[in-house]
Image (cartoon, rainbow, N blue to C red):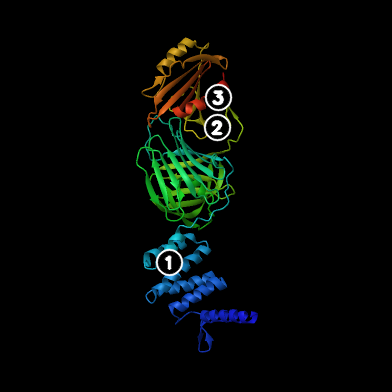
Amino acid sequence: MIMKRISISIGATLLCAAMLVGESGGGLRLDGAGQTPSELLQKGIYLQETVGDLDSAIKVYRQVIQMAKESRDNAAQAQYRLGLCLLKKDQQAEAAKTFQQIIELYPEQTDLVNKARAALHAPAKLLPAPWTEGEILEYSTDMGSMKMPASIPANFMHTLYSVRRSKTDPSRMVVESRLASTALQSSDTVEVDPQTMLPFSSASHNPMFDSVQITYGKSEAQFTFKSKPPRAVALNGEVFDYTELNAILRRLPLAAGYKSQLAMLHYAAGEVSTMSISVTGEEDLETPAGKFHCFHVELGGASLSSFWVSNDASRYVVKYQLGPTNNVLEAVVHPGSAAHDFRNDKLGFSGTAPAGWLAEKAAAMENQTQGGETLQFQAPDSLAIITLTVNPVGFTHDPKPEDMRKEAEQHSSFLPGNKVRAGSWEASRLSGHPALSWQVDAPDMMSQDPVVEYTVWIRSAASHAKFYAKVPAAEFGQMKPTLDQIVHGLIVK
């Protein structure tokens, strides 16, 4: 029985070898001349699967494709196998083009068309995640050709891109892109599988637009809007959420000549689009975060955009251009689990930010005189706008509480429809100086959602310190003790 099996195996191998080289007049035929499309296809399969010679198999499959008029069945099979060989050689963009041609040129080959569609939407090959838990990349955001009012500083907006574990399910990861300023905050988040980066859900919260949540299923994505009817978008294969684009780029095996494509769903577009990715060169960039040697990555799809990804273990997105906006890496921040101090020796103020919060210098829309400074606090999982502005003054003595109250009543809120909360006026002393605090209930100027404005003034002969927080009304009660913790920890000259 064993000898019989060996004989059959040897016989099959010899048969394949004969099909591979052929016989003509007692000599070996190596070029395939005179062979039928079926014979050439079998030759290519032998080279691909038995010999493992992908380059030779590719040449044979291209021959079969050229003979499509003689046999569409064999040409379609060769086209599909050519795509598999290109994938094996990590030529993903060429493979995708090959699979797409099957769909367009051989629609009657339904089985192969289905296989080609599945291959087109196969998960991208990803490297291990290069980031650390809780890492935040801070970008300055230049609006480029978008015209902004002259009163708004050039560095008014910045973007915080973070990666952290989900609080509700530690087996998942949350990617957030937050656009922040002292007047507006918006947030796009997506919860993903840490290994595949495939999304489970995403949400977009922007006071200027309709909020939306997306739940990803196997065959469709469900959109739930704040003020519009829900809708569903069909998913064909593996689709990524646009919010995680920067994180995915950091995990792609970028190299000279690298090409690939991703199927992406953008909440604003409301449809899946194919985005091509290609490394067009390498450049040296210097930003406030340091000097980096980067891959220049071009992304094509609905619109062209450019990314520069550092060619090191961190794979930082050092710079990116989306439409008219330019974003440059300013800092890499790790808030950690401990509180951290902030200070300005020139202005003579200092304090402590709670664990997990950021306190960073920001440009303020209000006028700052004689070298004042504004810090903006970023609270995790909240779009509250929280600032501390300190301006120097040159008076001979601290102001009187009653004078502060008169001034504050004229300056109680920037929001229309505001109403000072009854009993919220409170005079005290903080950091050894007169202080006054109050609360205002109002609709948000953009979203019209209810918010609470919490303001604390600390006035001395040397400084005017203003702590301001605009918090969604539903969050204020829970957040106020933390806000008071910051205020009572302030030291003002």
Of mark 2 and mark 1, the one earlier in the sequence is 1
From this view, report whether residue 21 is shown above or below residue 310.
below
Q: Are marks 1 and 3 in contact (CB under 8 Å)?
A: no
Q: Nearer the viewer, residue 148 or 226?
A: 226
Q: CA distance from mark 3 to mark 2?
A: 11 Å
For badge 3, the amino acid type reads Ile
Q: Quadrant of residue 152?
A: top left
The residue closer to the viewer here, 114 or 310, is: 114
Which mark, by number, is residue 486?
Answer: 3
Residue 270 in sight: no
Q: Amino acid at mark 2?
A: Trp
Q: Badge 3, how many Cα within 10 Å: few under 14, some, many 20+? A: some
Decide: few, some or many residues near mark 2? Use Cα within 10 Å; few <14, some 14-19, many ≥20.
some
The spot of residue 380 in percent (x, y) is 52, 34
| Residue on which disc 2 sits | 357
Q: Which residue is mark 1?
A: 112
Name the N-terminal-most of marks 3 and 2: 2
Can you say whether 358 is above or below 215 in the image? above
Pick the residue in front: 155 or 138: 138
Numbered label attached to residue 217: none
When asked about the image quadrant of residue 322, the answer is top left
Which residue reaches farthest front?
A: 1
Q: Position of residue 210 (x, y in %)?
A: 38, 38
| Residue 114 spot, x, y in % from top left | 42, 63
Can see residue 43?
yes
Q: Residue at x 53, y 73 (%)?
A: 47
Q: Nearer the viewer, residue 253 or 140?
A: 253
CA distance separating discs 1 and 3:
63 Å
Tell me the kind of residue under disc 1: Leu
Q: Determine crowd level at label 1: few under 14, some 14-19, many 20+ residues with C-alpha closer than 10 A.
A: many
